[in-house]
Amino acid sequence: MCFESEKVVMFVNAGGEGSTEANCTMSFMADSFFQGGDAFQTGEHIVESGDHSLIYQSARLGNFCYRFNNMLPGDYYVDLHFVEIINTYGPKRMRVFNVFMQDEKASQLVELHYLDYFVKSILSDFDIFSIVGANKPLQLIDSRVSVYDARTRTRTRTRTPKPTPGHATCPPSVSVKDDGLIIIRFEGVNGSPLVSGICIRRAPKFSALPVKREHLVCKNCAAEIEVTSAQHKVMQMKSTAKYEKKIQELSAQCQRKSDECYQAWMSLTAANEQLEKVRMELDNKLFQTYSLDQTVDKQAENLRNISSKYECDKKFWAVAINNLQEKIKVMKEEHSQLLREAHECADSIPDLNKMVFAVQSLVSQCEDLKVKYNEEHAKRRKLYNLVQEAKGANYSGCTSRNIRVFCRCRPLSKTEVASGHATVVDFDAAKDGELGILTGGSTKKNFKFDRVYTPKDDQVDVFADASPLVISVLDGYNVCIFAYGQTGTGKTFTMEGIEQNRGVNYRTLEELFRVSKERSETFSYDISVSVLEVYNEQIRDLLGASPTSKKQWRLAKTDVQGDRLKEAQNINRSLSALGDVISALATKSSHIPYRNSKLTHLLQDSLGGDSKTLMFVQISPSEHDLSETLSSLNFATRARGVELCPAKKQIDTSELQKLKMMLDKARQECRTKDESL
């Protein structure tokens, strides 16, 4: 787009907001000559737009016309600048329109006999996208128009427009006003017209062309026949009418084809959308199938492992049961034999002394049977402990034993999620008893425990691993289960739970009563429960009265005064004493400071000696609680390293005393009978 600046009368930036200086010699005028239409602007990059790309980033859209008044008489070139900046992705014939120039005055020129010189320049069915595509300029230049001067009655002339090289355009029509007016009208055929710029340049004057005579060649005799201009004009009109009719037919046919193409394109678009939707659904189905296949494979692998373990356990238990059945059979035979011998002795010995001796022998044999029964019962319990050991929960007696530590992490709370807190806990190796803590960047600290529970594990999973301790309680062992961790990490939920989802405490009591009921035919159990708390270094019986509930905060995270300050200090002192006891046990110190606090004094039988101890360490996944989480995990790691003595059965001396008294009473009765005899 390069013009001589002295020939440019005006250059209107259609759709522009104000006049701009293109360079030192040319400026673009604001869009103020229009009637109708709307301004449209874009920020898209216009390809091949030259030095003045800004005129193609605005346009006037709709049915509108431009009126240029007070034009000096003379010949002008009108250049039109187009660009498709809306229908960027096509298709063709989405925007088709016509351009008319000066045809509003054509009816007035008839009476002035200038209609034969007036050519109606029209851009018919003009489609920008079909010529250059989207975001590329299209320039229609050298459309010549002459302004009619009413005083001199100068005839107007038109000139066929010259398209910019590389672009195909059609010549627009021209109309003339007698008052120095140029009109350019844009009317839509399909969609709304779109124009970016209008440039009016002064054209050089035409020189008179020599008049030429027209001759026709006869097809029969090849003679030249001179014809008048009127005859030639009639022939031209007939030929023009013929071709115009043909053009109209072709235009109508082209319009039909365009409509068919548009409908086909719309159908193709709908089909493509449906195909894309089907493809997305197919991808989702494939992904679901893939996920199901992986789940099935994983479950199949687990099933194979469980089946293999089941077969091994089944064989082991089958052998053990067969051995027990054989031993029971032998014991029954021995018992029957003893009964027969007792009857024979009673029948064959008339002397009562011999009969008493036989009874005493039977009592001795019964005692032997009791000893054998107890041995078999111990063997069964040993086999049960072996099964628990195969599950990874060995609570049987051994030469040395550590405090078992289970780690449980709660999920992020709604408040933490709303605040944007991220989780710092990695559960990838949770099944192996390991978890990682992200301490910053890519740094991760790993911890190892006997069991690790993720936020997805429920109360049933937690109690399933702690339930073997219930059997140990009924077998006569001292057992302790306690929870440790930062405030708000779920200690109360793990130990007590809620009414609909009970915790370890309630489930342990239920299991105690269930197992004791199963053994009621063999053993008699007396179960007693006490509930107490340690508050400000004072032990309170919670079942004896209704104590006031006291909530416990770390001192570093609260602003407390008075009684609350004393409460927080005692809590921290108790926890500090608990840490000292754990450290002393871990280092096998000769002195264990159990008496430094009421809490450690109360837990003396649970943390040391011959007890079985299980500790739940509760942590928070939030990055906000990272320091507290690391502190709790380090403490739990030290506790897990504490090596305790072998667990021992706690014998009830009162029951033993009762047996001794019964034995003495039986002996006294025997002596009395002997004396009477």
Image (cartoon, helix red, strand yellow):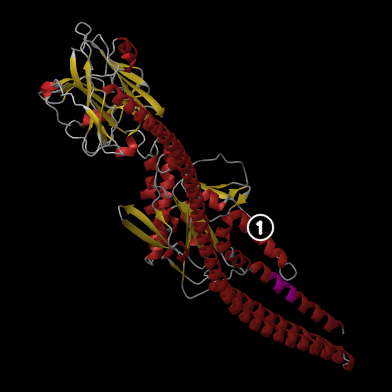
Figure check: 416 above or below 409: above
- The percent position of residue 32, horizontal first and vertical second, equals 27, 16
Residue at figure coordinates x 62%, y 81% from the top left: 315
Q: Name the residue under label 1.
A: 510
- Kind of residue at disc 1: Glu
Q: Is residue 283 visible?
A: yes
Q: Does the magenta stretch include residue 561?
A: no
Closer to us: 576 or 239: 239
Residue at figure coordinates x 41%, y 47% from the top left: 622
Q: Residues within 10 Å of mark 1 (few under 14, many from 20)?
A: few
Q: Does the magenta stretch include residue 658?
A: yes
SS for dot 1: helix
Query: Hey, which residue is sitting farthest front in the picture?
Result: 221
Query: Hey, which residue is sitting farthest bottom in the picture?
Result: 348
- The percent position of residue 393, horizontal first and vertical second, equals 53, 68
Residue 475: quarter of image: bottom right
Query: Hey, which residue is sitting farthest top in the picture?
Result: 151
Q: Which quadrant is home to the N terminus?
A: top left
Closer to us: 581 or 183: 183
Q: Give the range drawn in magenta.
A: 657-663
Left or right, 81 with reference to 253: left
- The percent position of residue 463, horizontal first and vertical second, equals 57, 59
Left or right, 550 with reference to 582: right
Q: Which quadrant is home to the C terminus?
A: bottom right
Q: Is residue 488 visible?
A: no
